[in-house]
Structure formats: C-alpha cells, structure tokens
Image: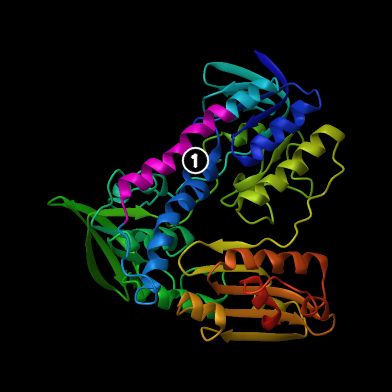
Amino acid sequence: MKKYDVFVIGSGMAGMTIANKCASKGLSVGITDELPYGGTCALRGCDPKKVIIGATEVRDFAKRLKGKGIDTIPDINWKDIMAFKQTFVDEMPKKIEKGYKKNGIDTFHSSATFINENTLSVGNETIQADKVVIASGSKPKVLDFEGGQLAKTSTDFLNLKGLPQSLLFIGGGYIAFEFAHIAARSGAEVTIVHRGKRPLEIFDKDIVKHLVDATRNLGVKLVLETEVSKIERKDGSYITTGISNGKETNYKSAAVFNSAGRPPAIFDLELEKAGISFSKKGIEVNEYLQSPSNANVYAAGDAADSRGLPLTPVAVLEGHIVASNIIKGDQKKVNYPPMPSVVFTLPTMATVGLLEDDAKEKGYDINVNFEKVDNWFNARRLNVDEYAFKTIIDKNNNTILGAHLIGPHCEETVNLFAMAIKTKMTISDLRTMIFSYPTMASDLTYML
C-alpha cells in the first residue's frame, strides 16, 4: 500500500493546481488520470477548439470584406487545421507529467475507486491518503434512447480526420453552437436539434435571439422544442428521429454528435464507500470546497457541486482554494468574482454578472440599456450584421450589475465589464476612462 498526504483524482486545471501547490509546500502528493494528462480544456475542449476556430475567423472576415478590398475568399483545409491543432494537444501531456515529476509528484494512469473513507484502488495499487481531492471533471451525457451510443462526442469532433458533408448536433448549448459554426463555415450542412423553447438558456434571451438569427443566416438548420428519441444507421447514413408535439420527424446526416450536456465524471468512483455526499450536479461541498460528509475529501472544478460556473478559470480558482485549505487547515472560503462566459461562435456572444430577470428578482432598482448597434463604426468597418449589447445598471449605486454582448471580439470586451463589476467602478468612472481608439473596448462607454 502506498501512502500520501494528498491524492488527486483528475489532472485537469483544478487537479494540476492542487497537486503542484501542495507539493511545493512539502506534502507528499500522488495524482491519477485514466486519460492523458491535461484535462478537457487543454486536450479535448477550449484550447483545440479555439485553434480550429482561427481558420474559420479568417474565412468569415474575408467573406464580410469581399468587394470591399478583398477579392478571394480562402478555402478551409480541414486536414491542415487538424494537424496544426494537434501540435498544441500532443505537447501537453508530456509537459505536464514532466512538471509533476520535477515537483516530486507520483503519477498514475488509471481510474480510481474508493475502498473506504481514505483508501483508493488505483489500477493495481492500493493507495491511502490523508486528504483526497476529486477533480475528475465532466464527460458527455449518456444518451439513453435507442441508438444513443451511435452519437459521437465533442472529443470525436475535435479529432475528425475529415469533415462529414452533413452533421447533426443533439442539444442547444454552447458546444453545439460553436461546432455548428465551425462545420458550416467549413462547408458542411448542419442541423441542431434542441428540446427546449430556446437554446443557450443561461444567456440573456434578447442577445441569444441575435445569435439564433446569425446561426440560421449561416445556413444552419435550428430545430427547437424537439426531443430526440432514436438514432439508427441506414445505408451509410444516420437517421435521427425527433418528436415535437407528438409528431415524429426524421433527419438524415453523415454524422450525429452528442452535445446534450456534460455531467460530472464522478459516478464510477464508488463514492458511497467513502461516505461522500453527491448529486447529479456533483460532489456536495461546503464553503471550503470540502465534503461535509467526509472532511478528508475535497472537490473542485466540474466535479464539484459548487456555485462556480463550469469554466477553466473557475476550476483554477477552486484549485487554489482547496490547496490552501489542505495546507493551512480550513481557513479559506471560496468567494467567486464575476465569471465571464463566452460562446465562441461568429459572431461571439458573451455574458457576465446578472441577467435582467435575476436582477429584478433580487430586488435591484435597475436601468436596462439594450440596443442593436450594427450602425456603429466598429460594426460598419468590419461589415458585421450582428452587434448588440444589454447592460444592467444599479440605479442606487450607479454601478454595473450585468453585461451581455454579441458581436466582434466581445470575448475581450466582456473582460472589461467583469473588471468593472468586481471593482464596483461607477458609470461616471467608466465614462471618464480614455480607451485607445478605434478599438472594440472604446465602444464600452456608449453601452452605459
């Protein structure tokens, strides 16, 4: 049996932060992951996705400026995109494991299950630890209808050797929209089938309407209020059956992708044996990100049922909190700053802070500024159709409660709003800021 001060399950950003920080303070640390080291973001999510999007951004920009200085719209070479993407993915696991070894952290490459409150079975090893951290991330939802196993995952999409001529995405979240935009701009026919009345439900409904319009204008078929009930393979194609108001409709495509959500990857850990409380949302944690039912267990990132959004920077923040509480005793409570979230479609959609309805429910006296501004200089110079904002202002304090954007580079502009919300900058302070011009950031003062 091997013994450690700290043992971490999962090598994504939360797990990596905890392992390295604890080891730097002289604690004995082990870490395991049944997948290559690096986690979803670096290997199967944010980073490779953003690399692929780069090529589609070039094509989109050229298309918008055709006849305005650009004569030729470049083709997208899928094989070259994937090769470029792979240069980022391939280097990560080795680099991360090398860092662990340098810091004296023992590395394992197997799934883990609990034997009792502080003992784990990891591959062929039995491991005992004073503190166990569950940072196992999330994984695609299991589609439990007939033929559900025929749907490919987001990981499969990011590793496609060739782009199918037609694709269908199940679910109307950010993964479906981002990949749909990539595929459509790369020449494929794309369908999104979503069970709800509107997609991207955690984002502002008025801003989402703009993205829905842009998505449909791109040629993506967006089917709402339709529950997928079956997938079958027929004559080399896939037939996906959707039910809406009791009526069945079949959709034919060369590939089907499961983008119906990502539950926490915790349900194979045999948590009951360790007395760990959990739900379908993740490991139950207190303000120290500690299991209230087993004080020697902590959870962070997508595996934890915390108030943090399932975002990489949030996982890093939670990782620092957990490491601090292991090293110094439970002294540091988690306190989330404003958490900006982005849908990397074209146009990009971003949000931070409170939604309009949330602000009203919380009793704030608010001003709401909502406007489509495709006539502003920045929209016209880039020849974009979709550029809109909604800002929620607290009348009493003259501060920003929330900002919701769609348009060019709003993934950057939203960070300024996040900083303004966190520091409680007043509208007057922001209006007297001098931003470099002409930039997207310089539009911020007109959104207040």
Q: Write the residue at 47% across / 46% down.
A: 48
Q: Which quadrant would residue 13 be assigned to in this image?
A: top right
Q: Which quadrant would residue 192 be assigned to in this image?
A: bottom left
Q: Write the residue at 26% across / 55% down.
A: 231
Q: Write the residue at 68% across / 83% down.
A: 446
List the residue tagged with mark 1: 43
- Residue 246 or residue 212, whichever sits in front: 212
What percent of the width, then of the height, locates residue 195? 40, 68
Q: Write the residue at 56% across / 62% down.
A: 342
Q: Is residue 207 magenta?
A: no
Q: Main secondary structure of the magenta part?
A: helix
| Bounds of the magenta segment | 76-95
Figure quadrant of the C terminus: bottom right
Residue 85 visible: yes
Secondary-structure class at tag 1:
helix
User: In the rendered view, would you say 387 is above or below 280?
Assistant: below
What percent of the width, then of the height, locates residue 376? 56, 84
User: In the rendered view, would you say 30 is above or below 41?
Assistant: above
User: In the rendered view, would you say 28 is above or below 44?
Assistant: above
Q: Is residue 371 left or right of residue 166?
A: right
Q: Is residue 385 left or right of residue 162?
A: right
User: In the rendered view, would you say 368 is above or below 24?
Assistant: below
Residue 225 visible: no
What percent of the width, then of the height, locates residue 152? 34, 48
Name the amino acid type tagged 1: Leu
What percent of the width, then of the height, locates residue 363? 77, 81
- Residue 266 or residue 313, whichever sits in front: 313
Figure quadrant of the N terminus: top right
